[in-house]
């Protein structure tokens, strides 16, 4: 039977899910945990067919959990539960996260989304896991403060610095600021780690809007891949 791992720190919601999803026990088994740390423990111990995760959670949030899944279980499709409007967010993302569901949601609606995902019987559409663009949009939407460290084969480790979801600096080898951000955003086959921001306040080195940077990075990447005529 398919096992669906659900991570959310709302204890009242978890109780509702435990009761409501019991009606679908002939379709899938729901494993409920209260944060990303418990979710990773489950992923290490047993196979999971689908992940449903909140983003804002204590101890270890959904962004870090998704980064772990991207690195160690890229074939597990993911559903992200968010309190923010989903239509504009989904329109910005590549098809590497299965879908978003907006909170608050009805338990039966979530069950339908889960069953539809399981019936597809396919892994994430992107076999390489979750793209950096998806992580960037989630960080911005959820207004997260962090350092996103990016590791790629044969390239220097880079870092993107966010405060309340706003990208203000980037470093990659001898590059910094916007030049480093464009190079990092265009990378493929990368793994990600999230770190806390340093206590000292760093100066803003990037003033271009994140979405504009993403568009520019994608255009530059396409131009690099196009054959010369």
Image: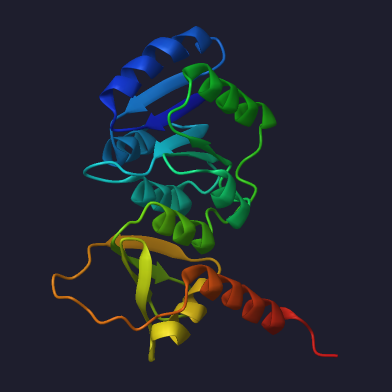
Residue 151 drawn at (x, y percent): 41, 70
* Residue 24 seen anywhere in this rendered image of the structure: yes
Quarter of the figure that contains the C terminus: bottom right
- In percent of width and height, residue 9 lies at 28, 33
In the image, residue 93 lies at what x, y percent?
Answer: 58, 55
Q: How is the image coloured?
A: rainbow
- Left or right relative to 25: residue 221: right
Which residue occupies 29% across, 29% down?
10
Outermost residue to the left: 199
Q: Would residue 176 be found to the left or right of residue 197 on screen?
A: right
Q: Where residue 164 sits: x, y (%)?
A: 31, 61
Residue at 38%, 37% in the rendered image? 43
Q: Nearer the viewer, residue 87 or 33?
A: 87
Q: Is residue 175 above or below residue 112?
A: below
Question: Is 71 placed above or below 83 here?
Answer: below
Can residue 186 be seen in the rendering of this structure? no
Question: What residue occupies the far right of the structure in this picture?
Answer: 229
Q: Nearer the viewer, residue 162 or 171?
A: 162
């Amino acid at each position: 039977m398919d096992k669906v791992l659900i991570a959310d720190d709302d204890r009242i919601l978890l109780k509702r899910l435990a009761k409501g999803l019991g009606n679908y026990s002939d379709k899938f088994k729901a494993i409920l945990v209260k944060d990303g740390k418990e979710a990773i423990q489950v992923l290490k111990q047993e196979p999971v067919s689908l992940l449903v995760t909140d983003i804002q959670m204590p101890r270890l949030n959904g962004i870090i959990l998704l980064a772990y899944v991207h690195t160690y279980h890229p074939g597990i499709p993911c559903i992200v539960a968010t309190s923010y409007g989903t239509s504009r967010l989904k329109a910005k993302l590549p098809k590497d996260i299965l879908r978003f569901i907006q909170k608050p949601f009805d338990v039966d609606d979530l069950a339908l989304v889960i069953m539809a995902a399981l019936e597809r019987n396919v892994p994430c559409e992107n076999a390489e896991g979750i793209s950096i663009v998806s992580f960037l949009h989630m960080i911005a939407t959820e207004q997260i403060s962090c350092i996103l460290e990016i590791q790629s084969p044969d390239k220097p480790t880079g870092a993107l610095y966010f405060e309340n979801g706003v990208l203000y600096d980037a470093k990659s080898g001898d590059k910094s600021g916007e030049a480093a951000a464009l190079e990092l955003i265009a990378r493929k086959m990368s793994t990600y780690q999230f770190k806390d921001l340093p206590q000292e306040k760093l100066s803003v080195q990037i003033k271009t809007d994140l979405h504009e940077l993403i568009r520019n990075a994608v255009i530059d990447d396409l131009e690099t891949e196009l054959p010369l005529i």
